[in-house]
Amino acid sequence: MNFSALLHLMVMLVQLWPCSPSTQNSSIQNTVQSFTAARRVKRGWLWEPLFVTEEQISQHPVYVGQVKSDLDKQDGNLKYILTGEGAGSIFVMDEYNGKIYVTQKLDREKKAFHTLRAQAINRSTQLPVEPDSEFIIKVRDINDNEPQFLDGPYVATVPEMSPEGTSVTQVTATDGDDPSYGNSARLLYSLIQGQPYFSVEPKTGVIRMASQMDRETKDQYLVIIQAKDMVGQPGAFSATATVTINLSDINDNPPKFQHRLYYMRVSEDAPVGTTVGKIFADDSDVGDNAAMDYFIEGDSSDVFDIITNSETQEGIISLKKRVDYESKRRYSVQVKAVNKYIDERFLKEGPFEDTTIVKINVEDADEPPVFTSENYVMSIAEGATRGSLVGVVTARDPDDDGSPVRYSIVHSTHLKRLFSINEHNGTIITTEPLDREIASWHNITVTATETRNPEKISEANVYVQVLDVNDNAPEFPKNYETYVCENTVSGQLIQSISAVDQDDSAGHRFYFSLAQEATNDSYFIVKDNQDNTAGIFTEKSGFRRQEQVFFYLPILIQDNGTPPLTSTNILTITVCDCDTEVNTFYCRYEAFMYSLGLSTEALVAVLACILIFLVFFLAIVAIRQQKKKKPPFSEKMEEFRENIVSYDDEGGGEEDTEAFDISALRTRTVIRTHKPRRNVASEIQSLYRQSLQVGPDSAIFRQFISEKLEEANADPTVPPYDSLQTYAFEGAGSLAGSLSSLGSNSSDLDQSYDYLADWGPHFKQLAGMYTSQRSVGD
């Protein structure tokens, strides 16, 4: 046996080896790989790297290169075939020598390379002499793209008086040409406008300060940068970009208030956050150097607040706390403005801040009621009966006249069902029991209204916490899918379980145990881990799937609430046929099949039946399609066979006018004893299944036809199947008598029907039926 035959045999053994262990497969594959490596020979294709220059215009195909087999003897016996990207349209190959030509103009920027495949076949045998091999034709670049500044126009900012060499910004141009080939994409930057204040680095495009500049003299410069490809050589393309460079200010001026004293006023009924007034400190600097923060100094900072408008740099004074005319009527507020960003180089110039005084007068007003607290926090146990006390809110009229106050709740539809308030004393009660598991907090808005001036209304927030009561039993957090192998030993952990409780989980403790009804004859035990989890362990070794597939383990879970609650949870354990570890997918499959009462063999049988039915259905469709293609005359023949109403000139006179009355056509001599019909559909299906084995010429079909013929003769009341028509009697005056042997009591086996074959192709089917019937009789 030569080496090639041995290699082929080894490959077939690897492919046909059934159900072999992984270690045997690995060793065989390694052996085949070693033989393959020893058999591998050097590739027989010969070619050099293939290139084509972009933008070539020619009336004739341009030669690119040649791929050639070392088996080519240049006798024309080999045929080269080119496939892949652009084969036949962009690239063509001479099938006799493997030379490749390009027929169109290419653009490297659209596609840098083309991947093609070459094949050499023997012209005589049309068999490949070289394997199908892939190669690449690269498109060689030319300088046909100008540099572009994609990010322009550029705007940069640099602090005034920056030292020489300070980096301002960087401009970058791009070139669509190939940077890895030639100098087409190598760019050189130069400065056209901007000397002597700025300079640019030729290779990087970084713009730097060439001298110190003062913003107060000039705060903006326009710099023009040029980028040339081909390193600036003659014939290079170029592009320019304009860079706007702004000199930013440095903080060398402190803020100054326009006035040393400001006057403002505010009503005592103004809510918190009301704007009292605005002040402004001027700064000669710009940008961030003119930005400042305002501060309120002294005790007034508890009543008033000031913020800075970042756009106008104004200080906005607002109420931080409600003011009371009866308590204090005038405030003196000291405000300080300080620069946000201070340059340490100019600290010697003095402090960068300024101070002013703001006088604020409080105006008297009719005030709304005032609650003793803006926010109330109350609590009540869940499940408390209707009318249980939640808490009390209190408000009073701060004015001298002391108007009475009326309380109410700003109801939503939900809260209106849960709480109510006494409008006279502010007592809040429940209107129905509360459930912490539905909502643990309720936010209520209570209003207090002056009875003398209903427009004076104030509000307070009441936060009601529903305290937890242990009213929910613990349960499994999910439906566990637990599996145990048939070969499992005693004491093996098969499942870890935990529990959840809808009650407040803080400090919860769960206890797990086996339900009392399952402790005596259970195959499993439950071990509490003392950390709100438990483990399910086997108590016996070995399980038999044939005896029991499912085990339903009742597990009792108890919490440590007051009073403690328990629940029984059922853990379903499925017995699996496995070796070392559980294959959950296989176990789910077996469990599903078991629940359906089907074995694997039964499922295969069902699928086989479905396949047979599908084949039968397709065969019927195919037959119907063939019948549709028959000539029109064939369809008419089928109609004539079923609708014969005249019998030449030998009719029986008036008796023939009643030809369609079955009872009139039959005489006493042809009336047969009625036999009950059998289940034809089941017999047809049974015979069809047998026909798949024995074929259409078997005696089973002949027996079936004979039985159906006998039934049709014996049952005149039921329409015949298979479009069989019974013509028992055509009238006493008819010389021909009955034209159909199907409805006759006498046997016509002695009669010869060979003459039917001479009537032409339209009677071929009829001739075959009578000939086959005669054969059955014989």
Image (spheres, rainbow, N blue to C red):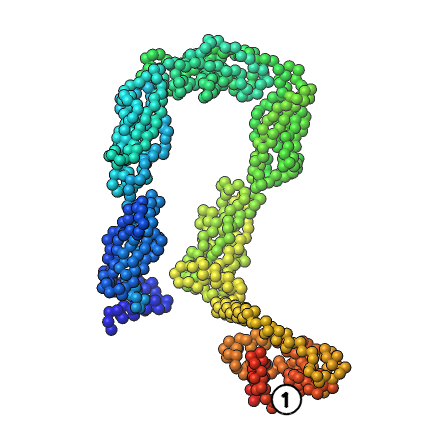
Q: Secondary structure at mark 1?
A: loop
Q: Between residues 224 and 355, which one lies in front from this camera angle? A: 224
Residue 142 shown left or right of residue 667 in the figure: left
Residue 43 shown left or right of residue 274 in the figure: left
Residue that sits furthest to the bottom in the current view: 750
Q: Between residues 651 and 392, which one lies in front from this camera angle? A: 651
On the question of residue 613 being in view, the answer is no
Residue 594: percent from the left, percent from the top? Answer: 51, 64
Instruction: Say which amino acid is labelled 1.
Output: Ser
On the question of residue 457 being in view, the answer is yes
Residue 52: percent from the left, percent from the top? Answer: 28, 48
Please say if 182 is above or below 659. Answer: above
Q: Between residues 518 and 419, which one lies in front from this camera angle? A: 419
The residue that appears at 53% across and 45% down in the rendered structure is 501
- Residue at which label 1 appears: 747
The residue that appears at 53% across and 75% down in the rendered structure is 689
Q: Between residues 373 and 142, which one lies in front from this camera angle? A: 142
| Quadrant containing the C terminus in the rendered view | bottom right
Residue 738: percent from the left, percent from the top? Answer: 68, 85
The residue that appears at 41% across and 19% down in the rendered structure is 291
Residue 603 shown left or right of residue 723 in the figure: left
The residue that appears at 57% across and 31% down in the rendered structure is 463
